[in-house]
Image: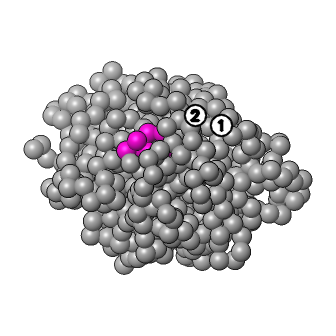
Amino acid sequence: MTERTFDVRDNMRILWDVAIPMADGLALRADVFLPVAEGRYPVLMSSGPYGKGASFRDSRPYAWNDLVTKHPAAGSRTSNKHQAWEVPDPELWTTFGYAIVRVDSRGAGRSPGRLDIWSVQEARDYYECIEWAARQPWSTGKIGLTGISYFAMNQWQVAALQPPHLAAMCAWEGFGDYYRDLCYHGGIFSEFLANWFARAIIPMQHGVGERGIRSQVTGEFVSGPDTLSADELARQRADAVVDAIAHPLDDAFHKERSPDWTRINVPFLSAGNWGGHGLHLRGNTEAFMRAASSRKWLEVHGDAHWIEYYTDYGLELQKLFFDHFLKADANGWDKRPAVQLKIRHPGERFEIRAENEWPLARTQWTRVFLDLDQTRLVESPPPATTSVSFEAMGDGLTFFSAPLDKPMEITGPAMAKLFVSSSTRDADIFVILRVFAPDGTEVTFQGAQDPRTPIAQGWLRASHRKLDPSLSLPYRPYHSHDDVQPLAPGQCVELDIEIWPTCIVIPPGYRLALTIKGKDYEHGGPPVAVPGIQYPLTGVGPFLHVNPRNRPPDVFSGRTSLHSTAQNAPYILLPVIPPS
């Protein structure tokens, strides 16, 4: 490419709609943003289906306004004309001495082809994009990957393919396991996929053309120059929702869309969100625990899931990380502790703390037992044999601790051991870890997707209770989800329920609580409406479990019973962190 192909504006040299050839002859389209000065630069790349030319502030005004209201600097550093959703601002990062490459993945935006999200083909395409960028005259050959959510999740996939020029990656709030994190929580289908696919993916499919939006910078249609019929578009995409429902077990369909952690050896920063239950958080912690890389760092924060990536806090982390691995900057990154946590307190208060491992080595794994007769959380197993039942689709049961006499920090993964029977052949169990203030109000937080998120959640379908012994840990049961074991009505079975990681410092006088029910958590207040979001927020955001095909009423609207004996008392295992 010659100099005259560059569009010079906003203190950048820009190459629009560059063709990146794939092995099968198709070409993906990318925008390349370079510093004005000629030279070779390390590359930060993102690839995904959201349309590289769609403006962040126009495509998601609520999220943009939330960001710049809380953090005005995030909206004032540059013109923001080139800022797209969940990827870095090229105006800013080119001033840091990086080339920014944004790729429309196959079948999305201005890239032709069949749209098939998180597919093997998409991961192979990403590999080829990385190696293409390494060969360009403006590239040093060191490629880093970055981005939030989708732009983090496919990093795990392509890293497992081990592209030679992938030098580092920052996966910011990105799930890893297609079955357990996205499609099925404990074997129960999550409605998120259906809502998100219709809202965020289909409108950006290549071929929407003039029915879509135009780039405010180039004036071109974000989803390509051609306008295809609805039938043509449908034939050119895999229906992710139909496919997921058709695969209720963790079979080859899900496994090929999930990374092989043992093959990820590139340096990475995995940034999670305490409020990310239902999609991302488990992927960030599992990656840190299981990926083969010897150079890996974990960070966990709070607030809405797009916020901290753009704040001064998030930018400093990313810049230190990439400067070290892509520029060989001796900035001390390799000497910093492996884990950085924003420890959560009631009132949306956080304090930064460095740690050396995950889970924390000094964790006091503490069993708290359920007293079924008194609906209490107690320190010792109750001696009596008893049971209690509830309507599965009702409010369930909530077990309260006594008010704490001193602060208690809970940081890490948790689990629940329950003994359950059902009046039908199956039961869905939802466990919600909660905290209540002395006046009886519940302590919730701004979660990744909902402003009133409880402390922690876990899910399990009783017929999916089979454990994988090779991956299960005492504090993190791992279910195989490869076999269905129906219940006989009235049959008591033992359930080990994974509760996704959490962090909370509970003050004295507050009470810990555990709710067990057969449906989603609902906050006691009225639903919250958010502009541009088609569903009301009731405490779990879009992560609802109400699909009638997956949860037929004749099976899941029965009565569920909890059982306790002196030998088999139900409990929760909590990661209690002693005072330093």
Q: Are marks 2 and 1 in contact (CB under 8 Å)?
A: yes
Q: Residues within 10 Å of mark 2 (few under 14, many from 20)?
A: some
Q: Amino acid at mark 1?
A: Val
Q: Residues within 10 Å of mark 1 (few under 14, many from 20)?
A: few
Q: In the image, is residue 113 above or below residue 174?
A: below
Q: Position of residue 250 (x, y in %)?
A: 56, 72
Q: How many marks?
A: 2
Which residue is painted at 34% across and 35% down in the image? 312
Query: What residue range appears in magenta?
Result: 88-96
Which residue is painted at 20% across and 30% down in the image? 508
Q: Amino acid at mark 2?
A: Lys
- Residue located beneath label 1 in the image: 217
Q: In the image, is residue 346 above or below residue 433?
A: above
Local secondary structure at mark 2: loop
In space, the residues marked 2 and 1 are separated at their CA atoms by 7 Å
The answer to whether residue 484 of the structure is visible from this angle is: no
The answer to whether residue 407 of the structure is visible from this angle is: yes
Which of 296 and 17 lies nearest the eye of the viewer?
Answer: 17
Which residue is painted at 49% across and 37% down in the image? 11
Q: Position of residue 521 (x, y in %)?
A: 51, 41
Which residue is painted at 43% across and 70% down in the image? 165
